[in-house]
Image: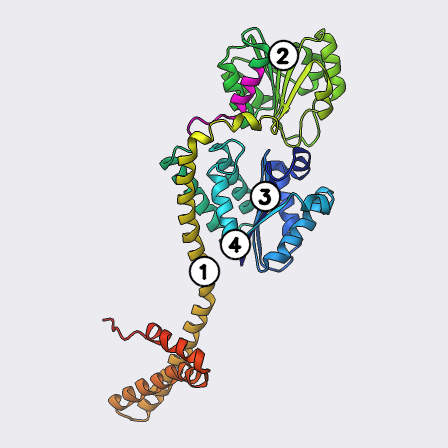
Amino acid sequence: MELLAVGLNHQSAPLQVRERLAFSAEQLAQALQSLSSRWGSRPFEAAILSTCNRTEIYCASEHAESTRIELLNWFVSERQVSSDRLDSHLYTRPADEAVRHAFRVASGLDSMVLGEAQILGQMKQAARHAEEAGTLGLMLHQLFQRTFAVAKEVRSTTEIGAHSVSMAAAAVRLSQRIFGDLRNRNVLFVGAGEMIELCATHFAAQHPKHIAIANRTLERGQQLAKRFNADTVALADLPNLLHKYDVIVSCTASTLPLIGLGMVKTACKQRKHEPMFMVDLAVPRDIEPEVSRLDDVFLYTVDDLSGIVQEGRESRRGAVEQAEAIIETSVENFMRWVQERRLVPTIRELQEKGQALANFELEHARKMLAKGESADAVLEQLAHRLTNKFMHGPLSVLHQSSPENRDTLLKLLPQLFSTRQSN
């Protein structure tokens, strides 16, 4: 089985391409089943990691190159995208490159926010979804377990996550550039997931005048609202309430925009063209991109925030180098395990042949004993016959080999047939 990682991220593809390939948590089970069905009875393992910044498939199969083509075709049919357009954005990481990539992603080295911790939890969710779907085999299970251990070591022994500027912090900074002090501003959060919770924490620290949370599941919205002394509103009421809010931050798992151009236009008129600051952290997007054309609206997406969150990378160069060193050592260790796994069928076959040979000679020895032969003579003959049969194969190969191959074999024989005896 060969490891392979195929996908795209914020560095290889723009937002409008990434959102076409994004999978919500509810879609992953069906997607994994659809993906697995393409391989039929052929050995195949797969896990899908889908976040606002990346969609990646980690898999193990018998042929890496044909698997990459299969994955590209699957993306095209599953998401109805052009193969030519998609192919220019996809990257492929085979074998040790796939392992290194997984380790770097989980450690926050490949994130838009250097050292961000949320990606590790998302990778754990990807592994859990694959396990539930029955597509997480031995190879990927081992890869993910090693990945989690490496990420933990990187975060506990380096300063990779120190002083990082998160998306939430960047959103607060941008809103302050427009409004200055947020104490007299109303803030609306659409969604109630981890990212919204993080954003709410940052904005609440600025003591805005009023906070509200709109979420599809009322109970989840109420739980989050209670933490921040906020109100809850229904998603269906957004068209009537949007004009009351100066700051709107949205991040849901919706596959279609929740806030359209017409809704925002109406809100702007009701606000008498008072500025609105909007942040869309969802992939696919929650807010129609045409909203950015409105004069009174400042709309930012995850890609728009990338410049701000890059701050501080230079000051953590030493931590990055230390993390990369940990990852390289871990990649070597994992690939050593992969190589050892490839030896298992050969070792098992040798053991089975050796056992079959021993059983045959034992049966022969028992027959000799039954005929009245002395035990010493039978044992001596047993040892002689086993030795001859054991050495027959290697000696035949040695005699029949070419001169150049014979020199190589002569160097290997002392290692294969160690003269050291064990008690």
| Gap between marks 1 and 4 measured at Cα | 11 Å
| Gap between marks 3 and 1 measured at Cα | 25 Å
Q: Is residue 118 above or below residue 229?
A: below
| Gap between marks 2 and 4 measured at Cα | 49 Å
In primary-sequence order, the first of circles 2 and 3 is 3
Expressed as whole percent of the image width and height from the top left, the position of residue 271 reads 70, 8
Q: Is residue 212 above or below residue 86?
A: above
In primary-sequence order, the first of circles 2 and 4 is 4
Foreground residue among 135 and 390: 390
Measuring 72% from the left and 6% from the top, which residue is drawn there?
Answer: 272
Q: Is residue 139 above or below residue 313?
A: below
Identify the residue position indicated by label 2 in the image.
246
Expressed as whole percent of the image width and height from the top left, the position of residue 341 reads 45, 60
Identify the residue position indicated by label 3 in the image.
56
Q: Secondary structure at mark 2?
A: loop
Identify the residue position indicated by label 4 in the image.
95
Q: Amino acid at mark 1?
A: Gln
Is residue 163 in the magenta section? yes
Q: Amino acid at mark 4?
A: Ala
Asked whether the beta carbons under mark 3 and mark 4 sit within 8 Å of each other, the answer is: no
Q: Amino acid at mark 3?
A: Glu
In primary-sequence order, the first of circles 2 and 1 is 2
Measuring 73% from the left and 8% from the top, which residue is drawn there?
Answer: 270
Foreground residue among 11 and 96: 11
Measuring 25% from the left and 71% from the top, which residue is drawn there?
Answer: 422
Expressed as whole percent of the image width and height from the top left, the position of residue 181 reads 54, 8
The residues colored magenta run 161-175
Identify the residue position indicated by label 1 in the image.
339
Q: Secondary structure at mark 1?
A: helix
Position of 416 compared to 179: left or right?
A: left
